[in-house]
Image: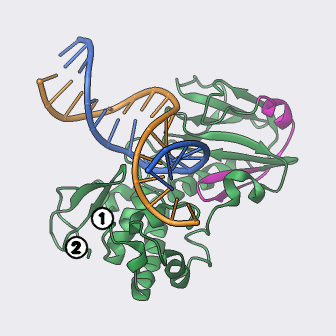
Chain colours: A green, B orange, C blue
Amino acid sequence: MPELPEVETTRRGIAPQLVQHRLIELIVHDSRLRWPVPAGLAAELRGQSLQAIERRAKYLLFRWDRGTMIVHLGMSGSLRVLDCPLPLSPHDHVEWRFDHGRCLRLRDPRRFGAVLWTSDPVDRHPLLRGLGPEPLGVECTPEYLYAISRGRKVALRDLLMNARLLAGVGNIYANEACFGAGLRPRRMAGRLRRADCVRLVAALRATLESALRAGGTTLRDFQNADGQPGYFQQTLSVYGRAGQACRRCGTTIKGTRLGQRSTFYCPHCQV
DNA sequence: CTTTTGACCTGACAGC
DNA sequence: TGCTGTCAGGTCAAAA
């Protein structure tokens, strides 16, 4: 489900409500996520204060007094802040109760998400160590994109989705960025010219920033910390729009399959 | 090394 | 109504 804009929207929603508060109790209703929720986490966290919530790629990093809790939302995860004694939904797996009577709940029907703990520097954690730069950070330049694409035979869309090269871009925004740059998702990455990379970086930034302003994309079940959907789906140029008219030129948007995932493009605007 | 494929898991939806 | 097949925003591990 959530790509960078949805994860960042979640972070911005929950952080002001929870930071500087102390954890009363962690309740794990179902520890079977992508990896088991660590058995000792409840005992470890009890009494610690939440210092900050940061984001790296699609990971949320909860900074506690004595370590970092790594949370990933997988395909179907969402975090919400609620008043505590509210009834549980079937897929509310983990619940953090804080000293001001509010609680954070992780809901994740497909259980591809994760809740992990480390007391080491978090960027050395195996899941984070190999990640590429943030697409909205200063390292993501046309030169960088040009450099990492040399000699690669993968499709452009898959280059953008490769977390070791660029962190946080998923299928929606990779497709949207390709449209913004006027490049077909299947274009071989190694054949990009410098001018393509200039347009691509600009398109990627514009797409992600615009999605952030809209509070993310809600296709079926994304909701922010208050349970509200995002609105960027109304602005999507190609993703999920197969058979509809291109907003720029009116040509019918094509939907196909690239690898195991669907891809969308305008046959006229994208070359 | 790069690239592709399978696996994990549940729910929604289309079609019969 | 109920069955079957397909698809979904991620990403790791293994195979090619």
Q: Which mark is drawn over residue A106?
A: none
Q: What stretch is highlighted in magenta?
A: A39-62
Residue A213 visible within the image? no
Q: Is A191 positioned to the left or the right of A61 in the image? A: left
Q: What element carries label 2?
A: loop
Output the chain of dot 1. Answer: A
**Where is residue B10 drawn, in percent x and y?**
46, 26
Against A195, residue A90 (above or below) is above
Residue at (79%, 34%) from the top-left corner?
A41
Q: How many labels does the image show?
A: 2
In magenta segment, residue A118: no
Residue A200 visible within the image? yes
Q: Which mark is drawn over residue A237?
A: 1
Mark 1 crowdedness (10 Å alpha carbons): few <14, some 14-19, many ≥20: many
**Where is residue A166 drawn, in percent x and y?**
55, 67
Q: In which quarter of the image is residue A88?
A: top right
Against A105, residue A241 (above or below) is below
**Where is residue C14 drawn, in percent x and y?**
56, 42
Against A245, residue A116 (above or below) is above
Amino acid at circle 1 = Ser
Residue at (68%, 39%) from the top-left corner?
A115
Look at the numbered discs 1 and 2 and tell me whether their residues touch, using CB distance below 8 Å: yes
**Where is residue C7 drawn, in percent x and y?**
31, 43
Sequence-wise first label, 1 or 2: 1
Residue at (62%, 28%) from the top-left corner?
A32
Q: In which quarter of the image is the C terminus of chain A?
A: bottom left
Residue behind mark 2? A248
Residue at (64%, 48%) from the top-left corner?
A14
Q: Which of A35 and A190 is in front in this view?
A: A190
In magenta segment, residue A56: yes
Amino acid at circle 2 = Arg
